[in-house]
Image (tube, rainbow, N blue to C red):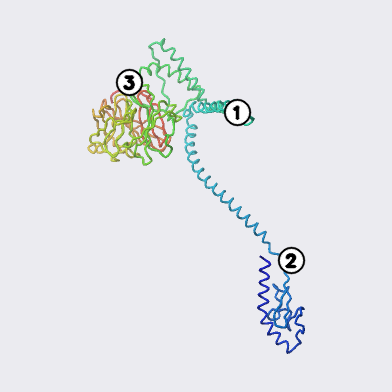
Amino acid sequence: MSYSLLFLLALQFCLGSASRTTLTSAHSRELTTPPTSPQATAAWLPPGGTSWAEGGTVSQPLSNFTGSVDSHGTCQCSVSLPDTAFPADRVERLEYTAHILSQKFEREFSKVKEYVQLISVYEKRLLNLTVRVEVMEKDSISYTELDFELIKLEVKEMQKLVLQLKKNFVGSTHIIDMLEVEIRNMTLLVEKLESLDQNNVLSIRRQILALKTKLKECEASKSDLVPATPPPPAPGKLLGAAGSILWILNFWCFSLFHQHTQNVSLALGSCSHGGVVNISAPSVIQLNWLGFSYKYGAWGRDYSPQHPERTLYWVAPLNTDARALEYYRLYDSLDNLLIYSHFRDYRIRYGQGGGTVAFNNNLYVNWYNGGNIAKINLTTNVVDVNRPLPLAAYNNRFSYANVNWQDIDLAVDEQALWAIYATEASTGNIVISKLNDTTLEVISTWVTKQYKPSVSNAFMVCGVLYATRTLNTKTEEIFYYYDTNTEREGNLGITMRKMQERIQSINYHPFDQKLYVYNDGYLLNYDLVFLQTPRQPV
């Protein structure tokens, strides 16, 4: 390709100069003698010049050539090309190399896009883990021995699989042996991590369990004399290893009989204590099964007066619109809830808000876009009753502070099923109604002086309404109560820690005397501390 191009350029130059050569030749015959031989092959140049270039100057790009003119005036040229040719093969190699590099760049760029997507996913996971790690750093009671037990169980399952592979595999078992060594190292690592529990939480719990057993053995022989009551621990304050064991030993010696009799009395629907006086630090149970985006909802434990020890847990996150209750899940035990196993999923299309509660194997919800209450059978997922709550405001007319669509908040305590709401007649103040859990008819109603939209949430204990408010992003306060038994109300100052900024729902369970709190997608629970003697009238 390079030789042809050069030859064509030289030929064009030669032919373009032919006319000038003819004129120059005619002029030269008058001055000099032209070549006599028509077959002359020697180089002939016009007078006054060294080449055929116009103006008598040498043309450098095409200077390496010779030419002659025959008797007919025809120009004959010979061109000598230089030794160095154009490197076409190198250009082809460069083009191929550039194509390969372009393909590699595209592949690496696509990997970068995948990495960016993975990083966004891991950022969300790290955010969830950060919250849990902060809880573990601040409150070592928040994590349990179940975490280690689950890892041990998975390692044991891997060990069983490796043993089966060794039995059934024919040929070299080098890779399987390596797997077995890795699993053994993993087992040692888990045991080491468990032994490095700096706060000795697991060992303390084992000792506490042993103390419980010993204390129960002496229950039958203990006299009726009761020692003085030791002061309850401050809410959210952790005790040292030795101090906690000694305090628990003394406290259990005092409260062992009262706890058993109190649980029996609570299951029968009576309350012998003097009301809530303190609350423990929060215990993070789990993130709801739908994920971090589902910040609104409710959860709790079903309470049945006939079977108070029943361990049926329910979780009901709202959709991402923070309004519609469409799915809920049931677990038969707390362990199953912790590992998301052996659950039952149900779907409904008429639930609204986070005021849901479970009572006697029924789920009670606010009917979507209305003031009705629906009773759903937890065995069949069928609505048994759907009845309006008289005069109740709905659809964000008087919802809680920082929480929408919770104008009707349902609650359960030792005595009954309750509805906490507001009406136009009460000008937004909280109204409490005791409901018939079978027919959902209103039995009794009380009107308080507390404005509902200024309350962050509320719950019922022994016929007493307890309302909370937000102090800051990490603290709530149980600041108000209304006793339906005496129709008295007043202020409290019980500090309540939280893990996230907003509390969406609070449900109380009479048997274990815990609060089940839905906190920005996380499932928390709290232990309540009661006054051991009945509250005196104010």
Answer with mark 1 or mark 2, whichever residue precedes in sequence: 2
Residue 500 rendering spot, x and y as whole percentages: 42, 37
**Label number found at residue 169:** 1
**Where is mark 2, residue-wise?**
83
Name the image quarter holding residue 495.
top left
Residue name at image x 76 percent, y 84 percent:
35
Answer with mark 3 or mark 2, whichever residue precedes in sequence: 2
Q: In this view, does 92 lie above or below 347?
A: below
Pick out the residue farthest to the bottom: 30
Q: Which amino acid does label 1 sit on?
A: Phe
| Local crowd size for mark 1, using a 10 Å CA cut-off: few (<14), some (14–19), many (≥20) | few
The residue tagged with tag 1: helix, strand or loop? loop
State the CA–CA distance, disc 1 to disc 3: 56 Å
**Where is mark 3, residue-wise?**
306
Name the image quarter holding residue 194.
top right
Instruction: Tell which tag, 3 or 2, sits nearer the viewer.
Output: 2
| Closer to us: 330 or 148 | 330
Q: What residue type is labelled 2?
A: Asp
State the CA–CA distance, disc 1 to disc 2: 69 Å
| Closer to us: 141 or 62 | 62
The residue tagged with tag 2: helix, strand or loop? loop
